Image: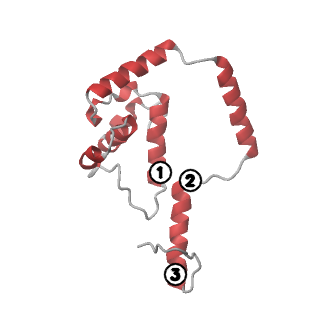
Amino acid sequence: LLEVNVSPSLMGSSPLDRKIKGTLMADIFHLVGFMPYDGQAIKKDEKKAARDKLKGVVSKVKNKNLSRRQDAWRRNPSPDAIDMAELSAEDWEVIYEAEDENARRGHFERIYPTLKRCKEMLPYFASTRFNDVLLARWCTTSRHKLYAHSPRGLP
């Protein structure tokens, strides 16, 4: 239960109030995944991005594989149509981030994607997007089979 009003207060007037609101705020910050500021890491990432930009555009082979994978998925936009062996690094990042968010959820309950709700809720999306279906595939595939093709292996 969450209080919603024009002027919400995070002040706790009682021990129970402080416990509830403190837990809520801790869960929110964990779920969002705030990271402490690290100037050196940011500079390192900026230098890497600049080097990558100088290397040029993506190879034609990668574009051809991406196009073929997307065409196959568009013909059959269901979780079972996604071939885990053909996922790109960007696709795996979506999966890794979903795993990370799920691990950080605290006392929150994930609504989508979940094993029970994937196939039930997928038709409610106004437009079916690849990442939504990819996450449906993620939650309905056993971890061993899922990560068999992962560049990082099992988490």
Q: Earlier in the sequence, mark 3 or mark 1?
A: 3
- Judge from the rendering whether residue 140 lies leftward or rightward of residue 8; answer left or right: left
Q: Are marks 3 and 1 in contact (CB under 8 Å)?
A: no
Q: CA distance from mark 2 to mark 3?
A: 24 Å
Considering depth in this image, is 118 or 144 the residue closer to the camera?
118
* Element on which disc 2 rests: loop
The label number, if any, that marks residue 17 in the structure image: 3
Up the image or down, 149 lies above or below 33; here it is: above
| Residue 51 image-quadrant placement | top right
**Could you say where residue 66 lies in the image, as x and y percent from the top left?**
42, 22
Is residue 17 visible from the viewing direction of this image? yes
Depth order, front residue of 125/88:
125
| 155 on left or right of 133 | right
Q: Secondary structure at mark 1?
A: helix
* Residue 79 in picture, x, y percent from top left: 29, 36
The kind of residue tagged 2 is Gly
Badge 1 amino acid: Glu
Q: Which residue is mark 2?
A: 33
Residue type of the residue flagged with mark 3: Asp
Q: Are marks 1 and 2 in contact (CB under 8 Å)?
A: yes
Which residue does the image show at 33% across and 22% down from the upper left? 71
Quadrant hosting residue 111: bottom left
| Residue 138, image x, y percentages | 35, 41
* Mark 2 Cα shell of 10 Å, populated few (<14), some (14-19), many (≥20): few
User: What numbered label is drawn on residue 101?
Assistant: 1
- Compared with 3, 89 (above or below) is above
Looking at the image, which is closer to me, 94 or 7? Answer: 7
x and y percentages locating residue 47 in the rendered image: 72, 31
